[in-house]
Amino acid sequence: MSAYPPIAEHGVIGDLQTAALVSTAGDIDWWCAPRFDSPSLFAALLDAAGGGRCRLAVDREASPDVTVKQLYLAGTAILVTRFLSPDGVAEVVDFMLPDTSPAPGDLHRIVRTARVVRGRVPFLLECRPRFDYGRADHTLSVLDDRGVRLRGPGQDLCVQATGPVVLRPDGADATARFVLEAGGTATVCLTALPSGAEPPAPPDDRTVRAAFDTCRSFWYEWLRASTYRGRWRQMVDRSAITLKLLSYHPTGAPIAAATAGLPEQVGGERNWDYRYTWIRDASLSVHTLIGLGFREEAQAFRHWVRERIESAGAEHDGLRIMYRVDGERLLGEETLPHWEGYRGSAPVRIGNGAADQLQLDIYGEAAFAFAAGEGDGNGDMGALRGWDAFRRMVDWLTEQWDRPDEGIWETRGGRQDFTYSRLMCWVAFDRAIRLARAHARPADLDRWTSERDDILRQIVQRGWNPERRAFTQHYRTEVLDASLLLMPKVGFLSPTDPDWLSTLDAMDRELVCDSLVYRYDPAASPDGLRGSEGTFNLCTFLYVEAMARAGRIERARYAFDKMLTYANHVGLFAEEIGPSGEQLGNFPQAFTHLALIDAALALDEELDRRGIA
């Protein structure tokens, strides 16, 4: 078990097409290339023995008494891991140069620079990739004494070094031991590239420094576009950078998280692959991005969603709930039985079987995204072709909205009449009506208005439980569901409506534990899966926003500040918080970080309105 660091003991780096996790031990224990959803090169986080890793750290055999600190260079995605030992102080700086070209890249490089600030420090380098989720063997060929090529199926990994690093074969892997004096540096570049492609030019101090400066300047310039000047700027900036890192630049599609298979309960089976683009998560991010001033990113995603709607064809056959980053629909789920999973959490799944589920809420979230920022003249719905596809989708929904579905949480316990799904269908019609009127576009407004109003009446009559005095998860249960925290955000109810305040009070009693919020109670509402889960970080931030809008501003602020203490040492969140305060689930999770930003924006607005510092 000690072979697995806590999930929170990682930072993330990326080039806007791939992302890697770097542990506080100096290990890259997760990296997939050439895309987020490609097979892994390093995945020791899911199988310590067979997943593969690249370690660049102080040599613990030669210098065992080491304290480690990790931080980001402020305002960037450049990660610094510091090693403090009796021998001296050393650092490893990890980064990837962002690739902003419009086409997917074949070459992806991690730059790892070791340097000594004080003293004389021994280092260990071990590069042990395991291609194709550890299912494929690889071979090693020597380029020179500072470079090797590790050849896998269809993809290779070049390892090239500067300074006193002399690479030595260790079977099919590469290792090195070296010592740096104060002021000394050495760089190791890991380059994933197609089989047979020419290896990149060997790095030197000048090109490494230039790449570092370019990377730093990119993030400084990008973050300058943020309009946020509120009370929690450091956390909001870090969340914004994280959302950018989790976006696939060639298409503008954001993924849900950088990883696959990390458990919602250690030892449990709730282990999913989140390296895909969910219509829901990404659509809600549009409002967040616009709220921060990142209109280019918001527009890129709206364009991506419009293409998915258009691809449904003349007779709209429904959106998928998730896609690969290039828009591909095939996400077949399989397990990796040769891997034990994080701390024994099996099965390890890649792909996602929930892709074929019916989740009707996604139509509301897509419409919510299109309606966001339409007043700035950059909306997609003014385009005739885009409107025609959108209209067909809404017409299709008039015949489909009153169906049971699997719901927002992708439960595998059968379809229900989920209140949240009906709520977002109401949003779909409501925003479609607004867009048609705003752009004077052809639409069956009478039919859309009738359906919208029918949904509202149905939710009020069947989604409201008079005994609980709350809106419930679905029409045949008394169970509460934190997804309904979005009711006031989408305009279905006023945030101070008595029925909403009563629902919020019921959630306080049943779903909230020391300001942390559960999605729902799986024991009371079986979801078809064994085991339990932690509190859901997204829901905690939605709870903060709902309380702030409801006028419960001091409680909201206290809950928000407490929630920030659960961030890891570099300001990142996974999906959930476990019973001992540990981070659980895939990491870092985009949905959590966008909800953090929304909560901060809501709190700032309400505090400013009341004149509170």
Image (cartoon, rainbow, N blue to C red):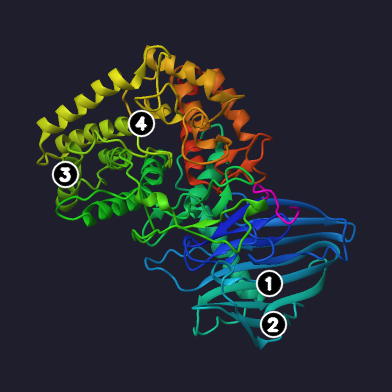
Mark 1 and mark 2 in contact? Answer it, CB < 8 Å: no
Q: Which residues are magenta?
A: 1-9
- Number of the front mark, 2 or 4: 4
Tell me where residue 22 appears, x and y as whole percent: 65, 58
Residue beneath disc 3: 391
Residue beneath disc 1: 127
Mark 2 and mark 4 in contact? Answer it, CB < 8 Å: no
Mark 3 and mark 4 in contact? Answer it, CB < 8 Å: no
Residue 432 appears anywhere in the view: yes
Residue 505 is one of the magenta-drawn residues: no
Say which label, 2 or 4, has the lower sequence index: 2
The span from disc 1 to disc 2 (Cα, nearest Å) is 13 Å
The span from disc 2 to disc 4 (Cα, nearest Å) is 57 Å
Q: Which mark is residue 420?
A: 4
Residue beneath disc 2: 146
Task: Residue at the far right: name it.
Answer: 86
The span from disc 3 to disc 1 (Cα, nearest Å) is 53 Å
Up-down relation of residue 187 to residue 403 (above or below): below
Tell me where residue 508 appears, x and y as whole percent: 52, 19
